[in-house]
Image (spheres, grey):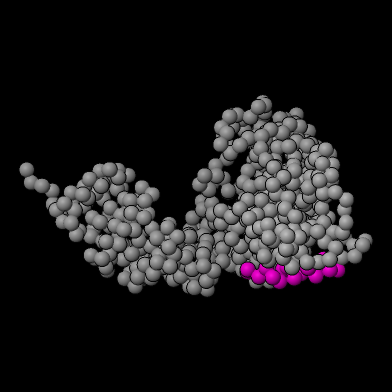
Amino acid sequence: MNHPTIPTLIDQAISAHQRCDPARMTALLKEVLALDPENADALYLLGMNASRLNRPDLAVNLISKAIALKPNNPYYHFNLAACLTTLGQTAAAAANLRQTIALKPDLAEAHVNLGNLLQGNRDHEAALACYRQALGINPALTVAHYNWGVILQESGDHAGALERFDAALRCDPESATAHLGRAASLLKTGRMTEGWEEYAWRFRLPNHAPRLCPVPRWDGSDPAGLRIYLYTEQGFGDALMFARFAPRLKALGATVLLECRPELHRLLAASALADQVSARSLDDGAPPPFDYDRHLPLLCLPRLLGITLENLPDHSVPYLTPPAARIQAWAARLGPKTGLRIGLSWSGNPEAVVNRDRACTLQDLLPLTTLPGVTCYSLQKGTPAAQLTAEWQQRHAILPLADALDDFTETAAALCQLDLLISTDTAIVHLAGGLGVPVWTLLHTACEWRWLESGHTSPWYPAMRLFRQPVLGDWSSVVEQVRASLDELRPGHSLA
């Protein structure tokens, strides 16, 4: 019996790869390497198999060996770059993409991937050049139009961004990311009705499917007499921001059954926003502890209620109310008030990609701690709280409160004893805003749609002032503005 030739084995391995049969693929390629230990194609394909099996480190090793044997294959460099990107080795990835382009200038995806790396490094002009090059090769490349739109969006050119997102949708009308790009620009420019419609495309994103329930979603029809199950989605800030709309549903005659994460449960229950409030952890698959006629994700309410900038300010703030006993406990904990009490928070979840631009550091806020007649309290939670060392507490007279902030109820009660919160864009600004506590929010240049394009006030929170970066990363100018505003405060002046 004749042994299969190396080309036959390679073809069979590729077929196994296409069938998602990694074990068979590996066995075939090992046969090839037994016959020819320096077969570059076999090493490359083993690397691709390792990448599919979530072993990018092994994939880099194997594909690099293939490149050493056959350095002029553009696809080797292209896929090595993908594995290096997964490992966070972006400089090496970019070098391999440039080599790919040198070997095969008409590979549009290589231009896109290089543009993505440059965009991640904030080299927007170079990234745009890559996307233009890619579209010159393939005008129907949805991702290139979309990424171009994101750069324009972050620079404040929302008209241009919408043109790019529309171009992406002409290539792929079902692109959820392009629809959501449109949503962000529409909402940020105040076009709420259109924006909410596009925002509904978030449920088409991977791992963001809506909850499966045995009854229909509420569709905006007359809710009177219906038991409607609302559940929070996304982050804590979103839940706190949109919980205000549950009472509107109650006012229309519905019985509102609100579900939230455990950290929010005590606060939302005490605030009487719904007829019943239950808690569910992220990994809890049990059905809710009540019967219901319709269900709805909380962030769908603005679309169905027809919320616009014109009807948003409805005097519903404050709509969050911590238990009176907790407020009294925090009054006793902080003692008699002397001077101005200011809370500080400087970072959200450091694992979140968006936090890179949103967060500042405690060092950035230190000029605020030297003002006479001001007592500063740190409400920062998580690993960024470690920036407040014992030495800094003593040197800068910042009092830490985070250890006692077990959930949002405790944080809310503590905020009620402060005159002002100064924070970057994290959940705590929504908490303070919903409580009606004065809050000064520090925003980076490409801040979220909810803060709109410009201005120093927020339609969502009457007691909030917005302080915006002049250029990305310039927190010192923002803090200077805040310090100047604090200096100007006199008895009788409003903090909002």
Kindly identify the residue that appears in the image at 82 percent across and 53 percent down: 418
Lateral position of residue 373 relative to residue 245, left or right = right
- x and y, in percent, of residue 50 in the image: 33, 51
Does residue 277 sit above or below 239 in this rendering? above
Q: How many marks?
A: 0
- x and y, in percent, of residue 132 in the image: 47, 70
Of residues 165 and 5, the one nearer the viewer is 5
Main secondary structure along the magenta-highlighted residues: helix
Q: Is residue 313 visible?
A: no
**Residue farthest right in this picture:** 492
- x and y, in percent, of residue 65 in the image: 27, 61
- x and y, in percent, of residue 442 in the image: 71, 62
- In magenta, the rendered stretch is 472-488
Q: Is residue 339 visible?
A: yes
Kindly identify the residue that appears in the image at 40 percent across and 65 percent down: 93
Of residues 321 and 189, the one nearer the viewer is 321
